[in-house]
Image (cartoon, rainbow, N blue to C red):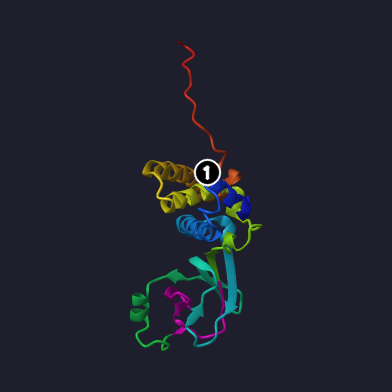
Amino acid sequence: MNYGELKTSIRSYAEVDSNVLSDSILNTIVQNTENRIFRELNIDAFRQYATSNMAIGQRYISVPTGLRNIRYVQVRDGSGNQTFLEQKDTSFMAEYDPTPGSTYGLPKYYANWDQDTCVVAPTPDATYSITIAYYAQPATLTSSDSNSNYISNNAQDMLLYGSLIETYKFLKGPSDMIQVFEQSYQAAKESFGVEQTGRRRRDEYVDGVVRVPLQSVDPSK
C-alpha cells in the first residue's frame, strides 16, 4: 500500500472527503502514527549499522543520522579483535573519568551524551574502528503519494488503524469508535510484534519447530 492508497482508505473509513481531511491534515495524522509505531516496536527492516574510526584522544562519537535507539556498540583494534562496549549513564562516566581525557586505553563503556553524540571511556589511545548498530526511522510516507515502505506493505492494517485513531480524534468522533480502532490497532501491533520479535528471531534448527500441544485421548476408554 502506498501513501495515496492509505489516504483514500482513511477518507473512506471516515466517510469524508478531502474538504474535511485535507492532505496537510492527513500528513500530520500519518506522521503521528508513524512516530507511534516506531516508538512502540523494534522492526528488523529498520536495523542499520554505521562504522567509523575514532581519533586518538577523541571521546565523543557522533551518532548516525536518523537513529532512534542503539542496539549495541562494537570496537575493533588494529589486529581485528572486537570488544562490545557496556552501556552506562553519564554519571558513571563522570565518576570513571573525573578529569575527561585523562584516562586513555581501549574503550570499555559508552553512554548517550546528547541527541547527536555518544561518549566513550576510557578515551581512545589509538585509532579504533567503532560500529554502532541501531534502529533508524525511515523517511515519512507523506512526502509523496507513491511512497511505500516495509510497514505500509507488510503491516498496512496496523498503519491504517493507527491513522484512524488519530483521524477520529481530529473529527471529534464518538469515543466508542476510537476504542474500536484502538483495539484493532493493538491486535495488529501484537501480531506484527510476534512476527518481528518472535518468528523472525527463531531458528527451526536451533529452537525446534513450533508445536501446539494436543490433548491425547485415553485409548482404554
Question: In the displayed structure, does residue 80 sit left or right of residue 122?
Answer: right
| Residue nearer the viewer, 220 or 2 | 2
Q: Would you call the spot at circle 1 few (<14 residues within 10 Å), some (14-19), or many (20 or more)?
A: few
Say which quadrant the C terminus sits in: top left
Give above or below for 216 relative to 165: above
Give above or below for 181 relative to 18: above
Residue 171 is inside the magenta segment: no
Question: In the displayed structure, does residue 180 sit left or right of residue 199?
Answer: left
Report helix, strand or loop for mark 1: helix
Mark 1: which amino acid? Tyr
Q: Position of residue 214 (x, y in %)?
A: 49, 26
| Residue nearer the viewer, 204 or 116 | 116
Residue 117 is inside the magenta segment: yes
Q: Is residue 176 visible?
A: yes
**Circle 1 sits on which residue?**
13
- Find the magenta span and give its range: 104-131
Q: Residue furthest top?
A: 221
What main secondary structure does the magenta stretch of the protein show? strand
Q: Residue furthest right?
A: 146
| Residue nearer the viewer, 93 or 103 | 93
In percent of the image, x 60 and y 63: which residue is there?
143
